[in-house]
Amino acid sequence: MADELQPVTVLLVDDEENILRSIQRLLMDEDFDVETATSGEAALEKLQTLENVGLIVSDQRMPGMNGAEFLGRSQEYAPHAQRILLTGYSDINATIEAINKGGAGRYLSKPWDDEELVSAIRHALGIYRLGVETRRLNEINNQQKEELAAWNAGLKKRLLQTAATIREQHEAIKGLDEKNIAAVLCRTFDNFFEVMGDRNAVHARTVSILVTDVARKMGLDAETVALFRLAALLHDAGKFGTLSHMMHKHLEDMSESELNDYRQHPARGEEMFSKVEELAGILPLVRGHHEAFDGSGFPDGLRGEAIPLGARLIAIADYIEEAAHSVDQNRADYALMSVKYRGGVQFDPQLVSSFQAITNLVYYEGRKAGTVAEVEVGPAELISGMTIARDVESGGGVLLMQRGNVLDAAGIALIRSHYRKNPPAHGVFVQLLED
């Protein structure tokens, strides 16, 4: 925005030139430009040529156009500028008019106190600069919304195009065994995410790798493996659109409205693909990937083995990928430890251990077996049962928890509370022990 690059201008308006000079002297050392005018009419003409006017200071009693009238008309040329009226004690009605109609934010009685006048000018310019920054951020926000909308429109178009090619490919492989269809669709969508190439694509493809490996090692038939792989690729498709900006946001950091929207994305994903006959097999897996083993999940509150097997596998892989991505080192150990702590509650405990080998392979870092390590995590990633590797202190140096303590719900709540109010420069270090 132009306002950011140009110096701020203060316009002084008074029919007495000695008063203008007096105020100019007060402002000699300030970090803004000063312009003057000796009448309201002249000031309006000058406003048409000036840019980035942050403040107008006007006397009330002037020949011709008075201060209240001038300030009102000045809004046409400098709508965002702050306004101060200089007035005598007897001009109370004019002062009220200037505030109500002229946009004056403050008035000062004549004769004024020099320090009070300078302080009022500085304060008014502070408000103006804050407004400039707010408008700049709003402009960036609106631009990002437009870009996001364009990206979403393009993504939706690409998804629809991808879905449209499915029928073409289906026709082409009618002569083949029906078991080959899911494999063809997997390659189609895998290529789509490869071209997409952003964080969401990395997440989708990694979850697919994890699920596919476990499904194969469970001895499932090729058709089922391909179906699970395809569902893993598309499990988060319901987030595309209005939820794209918070696809990997912690639930604890979401507002109530964001959380309500987020809980709808499995159903949205199911609906997105419901009209494509060839994708019918993935619908319950996409819908069910946020169901919890103890029944506390969404959208249907399914429990235990009532949750489709593929959905249970995707849920674990989804969590492992997010957990591994949240830390900079020891990713496999941290992700496996975290998902293990949630076994029986969020995840099927019989399936959690099946992900160990593929997780270690995907996030291999070469650490020797049996060695103790630590990892730095944010307070949102803390789970009951984790062991603190270093003393935990607030940003103010208050000791919250000593090294070696095992986290429970109360300890986690304490740490999160202090990190919100007075966060230190680092996260919480928790201990890892490789099996």
Image (cartoon, rainbow, N blue to C red):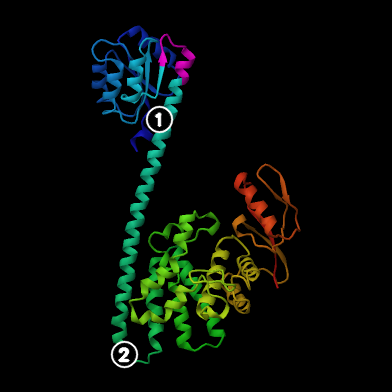
Image: magenta residue range: 108-119
In this rendering, does residue 302 appear at all? yes
Residue 378 visible in the displayed image = no
Q: Which of marks 1 and 2 is in front?
A: 1
Residue 422: x, y in percent?
62, 44
What residue lies at 59% left-to-right and 60% top-to-bottom? Answer: 328
Q: Do the residues labelled 1 and 2 touch (CB within 8 Å)?
A: no
- Residue 110 on the magenta span: yes
Mark 2: amino acid: Lys
Q: Nearer the viewer, residue 413 or 164?
A: 413
Residue receiving disc 1 = 128
Residue under circle 2? 174
- The residue that appears at 38% across and 40% down in the rendered structure is 136
Q: Which quarter of the rendering shows the N terminus? A: top left
Label 2 crowding class (10 Å Cα cut-off): few <14, some 14-19, many 20+?
A: few
Residue nearest the observer in this picture, 184 or 61: 61
In the drawing, what numbered circle is on residue 119?
none
| x 45%, y 71%: residue | 235
